[in-house]
Amino acid sequence: MGKRILVNILVSVGAVLVTLALIESALFIMAKSDALNPFATLGFSLEAGSIRVDELRTRLETYLTNADSANYISDASTGWTFQPNAILFDGRLTTNSIGMRSAREYSEAPAADTIRIAAYGDSFTANPDVEDDEVWTQVLESALGLRDIRAEVLNFGVGGYGMDQAFLRWQHVGEGFSADIVIFGFQPENLHRNVSVFRPIYARHTGIPLSKPRYLLRGDELKLINYPALPPAKLMEVYEEFDRHPLSAFEFYYSGASPIPDWWPFPRLANLINQAIAEPPKPSDDLGPDGERGQLGKALADAFAEDVAISGASFIVAHLPAQYELASHHNGGRPSYTFLLEHFDAAYPYLPAEALLGPEYIKPRYWGGTGHYGPEINQIVGEALASKIEACIDDGACPLPRFDATEPAFRIGSADEA
């Protein structure tokens, strides 16, 4: 009798364990896996939300020890920027004295016979996967020259940036270079980065263990927090007491310390149950007009455009989709941030790169090793922007107040050329 009871208990325990293992496996299969959420489903993150203090300490100490040779340096106004006067990413990307992607220096005042164009955005603008002369900003400069338009294109893109950081880079560095036309390279992941303060919490495996300023949308007003950005040497103090730090409340990708121990055999299931009991799920997709990320993205774009207009420059938006977004587009997908693309199209001169790239461009050979555009896509985007800018100048949508309207000096072969 005792043996039968013991066998029944063991069978029952085994059945429970097998069931739990099957559920854990199902969660692993069901989970979305991308750059934003390595494991997430049903509106919950399946990874523990606790701060891995030892991991962050090691990463931060390694960064501080090697800061002089790192690709990125801390920057109080934007969080980080490229290492200046350097050759980065295995020799593909050259920076000048202000961390701009360029092998040359630029005076703040542009030449009287040259249109100055400045591009802002993240790594899809800076693009570490191609050589300096292959990035779309340089293709644009060359393509305008072939259209008899004398222009120079300054690339202020920086890897890992949100829209907020691109806007701040314009305000604190780029605006002083007196651009005639400003291009914002919008990559949809920007919408997720906008609501993050601490890069290692948003992207656990990042090579940028730093914090950034973040805008909050309060009614119709943008309020800036963590500005200036915390210096790297102060970050460990924050991480060690993260739940008590005021900025933790504004880190969208932090759900609070998880009590699930690392040794727990079914961590995803346990974390899912814990989050479901402890708090409602954060919306898995609030990129639309009623969601925080969607609303903040629109407000930042419009603030950027307004500031550019006050400076006397024209504002152009280029939508630069990542590979998975291009694939979704060709599979008939309609992203929830479509309202934002429609707003760009209605409000500003706008270039949707997905309209230029057929389904064949989803193939890996058109993309670089870190997931950015390869040379051929850069060529297509640069040439399309040259056509867009030429038309924008000709139809008056991009006014150029520095130049005479009848026979502008930037036209190669104009009467003013001596």
Image (cartoon, grey):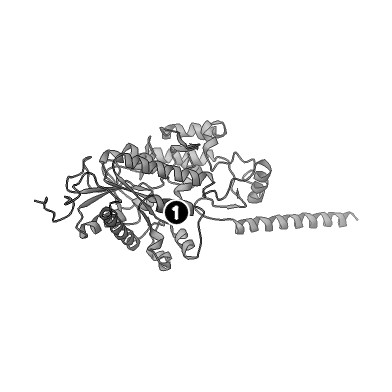
Along the line of sight, which residue is nearer the eye, 4 or 367? 367
Residue 80 visible in the displayed image: no
Give the camera-side residue of 37 and 157: 157
Q: Is residue 303 left or right of residue 383?
A: right
Reading the image, the residue beneath label 1 is 342
Instruction: Please tell me whether residue 411 is drawn above or below residue 302 in the rendered image.
Output: below
Image quarter where the N terminus lies is: bottom right
Name which residue lies at 37% across and 48% down.
Answer: 121
- Where residue 122 appears, as percent x and y from the top left, is 38, 48
> What crowding class fits label 1: few (fewer than 14 Cα within 10 Å), some (14-19), or many (20 or more)?
few
Name the residue furthest bottom: 360
Vertical placement of 259 versus 6: above or below?
above
User: Which residue type does callout 1 highlight?
Assistant: Glu
Q: Residue 61, percent across and down?
A: 43, 38
Residue at 58% across, 43% down: 49
Residue 389 seen in render:
yes
Q: Tell me which residue sits at (26%, 46%) in the image.
A: 180
Q: Residue furthest right?
A: 1
Image position of 5 (left or right of 355): right
